[in-house]
Each structure stands twice: as structure tokens, then as C-alpha cells.
Amino acid sequence: MNVDSPTTWRKSSYSGANGGQCVEVAEGFTGVQPVRDSKDPSGPALVFSATAWQSFVTAVRTGELDAR
């Protein structure tokens, strides 16, 4: 998998509009979810299993994680 190939990244809907703590995710990868820092688009991307990423998103949505 090459996340540097032409990939469409989208900013997370949970990212603030002020350019602060923002993450972007790439769609179209089977079984994995690439994630990167929107402030450093040429930097590294983290790649999570689809299951792990869904667990994280669910925890954020349900308030399971403290937003400090």
C-alpha cells in the first residue's frame, strides 16, 4: 500500500475549523485506514486496521475519550 500515491484526503469532521488539531483520513483502502496530520500533508501517515479505526471513532462519538 502506498499512501503517497494520488489519494484523496479529507479532513475529519471532528477537527476544528481554526487550523488547530486536525487529522485527515484517506478513503478507498481495503481493511485499513490511513490517517495523517493536516498541518503536515507531506509528512508520515499512520495506518490503522479498519477495526481499530472504527473502535476509535466510536469511542470519540460516544464521549468515551476525554478531550483534554
Image (cartoon, rainbow, N blue to C red):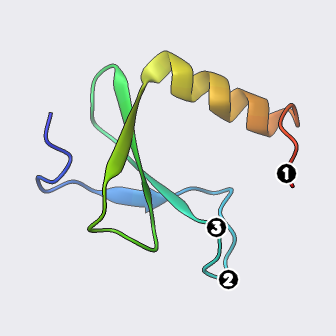
Q: Position of residue 61 (x, y in %)?
A: 78, 37
Residue at label 3?
A: 21
- Residue at 35% x, 57% y: name it: 9
- Are the residues at dot 3 and dot 1 in contact (C-beta closer than 8 Å)? no
- Residue at 72% x, 28% y: name it: 58
- Residue at 65% x, 30% y: name it: 56
Mark pair 3, 2: CA separation:
9 Å
Q: In the figure, 45 relative to 33: above or below?
A: below
* Left or right: 35, with 6 as reference point: right
- Are the residues at dot 1 and dot 2 in contact (C-beta closer than 8 Å)? no
Residue at label 2?
A: 18
Q: Position of residue 33 (x, y in %)?
A: 39, 34
Mark pair 1, 2: CA separation:
17 Å
Which amino acid is tagged 1? Ala
Q: In the figure, 18 relative to 28: above or below?
A: below
Mark pair 3, 1: CA separation:
11 Å
The part of the image, by quadrant, that contains residue 7 is bottom left
- Residue at 38% x, 42% y: name it: 46
Single out the mark in the foreground, 3 or 2. 3
* Left or right: 42, with 52 as reference point: left
Residue at label 1?
A: 67
Question: Tag 3, which secondary structure?
Answer: loop
Which amino acid is tagged 2? Asn
First in residue order: circle 3 vs circle 1 = 3
Question: Tag 1, which secondary structure?
Answer: loop
Q: Position of residue 53 (x, y in %)?
A: 54, 28
Badge 2 density bin: few <14, some 14–19, many ≥20, Cα 10 Å: few
